[in-house]
Amino acid sequence: MTRPGIPDAAPQQARLASKARSADAAAGLKNLHQLIQLRWLAVVGQVFTIEVAHYSLQLPLPLPEMLLVVGCLALFNAASLLRWRTGHAVQPVELLLALLVDVGGLTVQLYLSGGVGNPFAFLYLLQITLGAALLRSSHVWAMVAVATACMALLTRHHLPMPLEPDFSRGLASPYVLGLLVCFVLNAALVVFFMNRIGRNLRQRDVRLAAIRQRAAEEEHVLRMGLLASGAAHELGTPLSTLAVILGDWRRDPTLVQDPVLLHEVAEMQAQVQRCKTIVSGILLSAGEARGEASAQTTVCRFLDTLVQRWRATRSVQDFAYDNRFGADGPMVADTTLEQMVFNVLDNAREASPQWVGLRAERSADGHSLVISVRDRGPGFTPAMLAQLGTPYQSSKGRAGGGLGLFLAVNVARTLGGSVQAENPPDGGARVTIRLPLSALALE
């Protein structure tokens, strides 16, 4: 199985494009749903308006034809609702066609009820306003052209309706009253739906901004990985040379007779070996391992080995290890996972040299490995908690610091997990790493 090492630029760009398409698809589905809701309101409103005009105002209207148009709009809206429930991405041309159907339905209704002499002719502006918010520029101008052509045709081709624009009567005039109702409908629907559409677009922009931020962080990891890989290659040769020289010194007769020097040489050999192990780990994470590749192990064995190695190479007065994982299971372990936990433990040791605690357990749903690292230091600042996972956010005031948690967050994300930091009520700090067992298990 694949392990998180140095990210490759091409897959990273592909993931960014995929997530951007996902954000656009989500916004498109929400906007289609807004149009479906608006069309249901139009269907109800047309039925109500036809009833009032025909029965209350005694206007002669072709009821069968007008109700047939309303029925066709309702059927189209039902089909649109089924399309929305599929969850597939909505293409811009689909929104254009949906709005053109609304323009067509309005045109037929106006043709049957007086043409441009009908005060509800100004509802064309509502369709154009929605198009300006939802469509690309070329599609919007196409809608403007279609709506203008329909208005022009209605000036000459329409069925007559005895509705005179008698403005002297004020609201007692049916035409003036219709104008007022049309204005209120336009204003209310534009405000209501434009706010909802604007909220959808803002949510999409927030998602895209988060995706771009994630891409920038991954690019930062890529640059650091390339730098670390190059440095590891450069360090390999001098470390090997030092190892050979120290081996020769241990066999030198003069040094053999001096226990103090011999002990110091042995200590230097141990530190050189540790440096070589670190270099091998960097190259392993970069996909250029000098030694063995990812190894089969179990979760408990991986944790026990990890703790043993960390305690052997770090000095801390009191280290509390509590393994509550339960029933063991197979997994694939490599240096990247180990180094991720090491980074968190090292941060805890620097904040609290007297005591560091590590607790491992299975999540409540049984699908994740949860590793919690505690310390008794001053805890995280609010700024660090707000920007967890951002590089160079450190409380140590050291240039280049703050990369431990940044790398841990990115490795966990790559595996589909997460990293959380908090200041417990009883003091200190706690970092919780959650890794899905499906990403750690053997394929």
Image (cartoon, grey):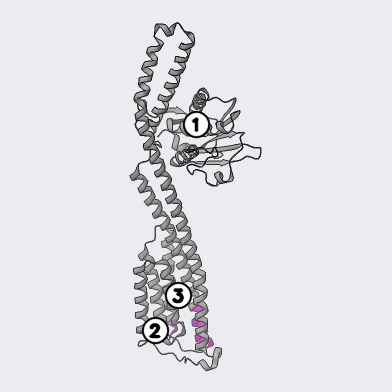
> Up-down: is 397 above or below 127?
above
Q: Which residue corresponds to mark 2? A: 111
Looking at the rendered image, the quarter that the N terminus falls into is top left
Q: Mark 3 falls on what kind of element?
A: helix
User: Magenta region's main secondary structure?
Assistant: helix
Identify which amino acid the numbered label 1 is placed on. Phe
Q: Mark 2 falls on what kind of element?
A: helix
Identify which amino acid the numbered label 2 is placed on. Tyr
Residue name at image x 40 percent, y 71 percent: 99
How far across and how far down the image is residue 140, in percent? 37, 71
Judging depth in this view, the residue of 239 and 387 nearest the camera is: 239
Looking at the rendered image, the quarter that the C terminus falls into is top left
Q: Which residue corresponds to mark 3? A: 126
Judging depth in this view, the residue of 420 and 92 nearest the camera is: 420
How far across and how far down the image is residue 157, in percent? 35, 87
Tell me, for residue 375, which label it has, or none. none
Task: Measure the alpha-carbon separation of dots 2 and 3.
Answer: 18 Å
> Up-down: is 31 above or below 349?
below
Question: In front: mark 2 or mark 1?
Answer: 1
Q: Which residue corresponds to mark 1? A: 342
* Sequence-first disc among 2 and 1: 2
Judging depth in this view, the residue of 50 and 115 nearest the camera is: 115
How far across and how far down the image is residue 70, in percent? 44, 76
Which range is magenta?
47-63
Would residue 138 be counted in the magenta stretch? no
* Sequence-first disc among 3 and 1: 3
Judging depth in this view, the residue of 348 and 252 nearest the camera is: 252
Q: Is residue 198 visible?
A: yes
Residue name at image x 36 percent, y 33 percent: 229
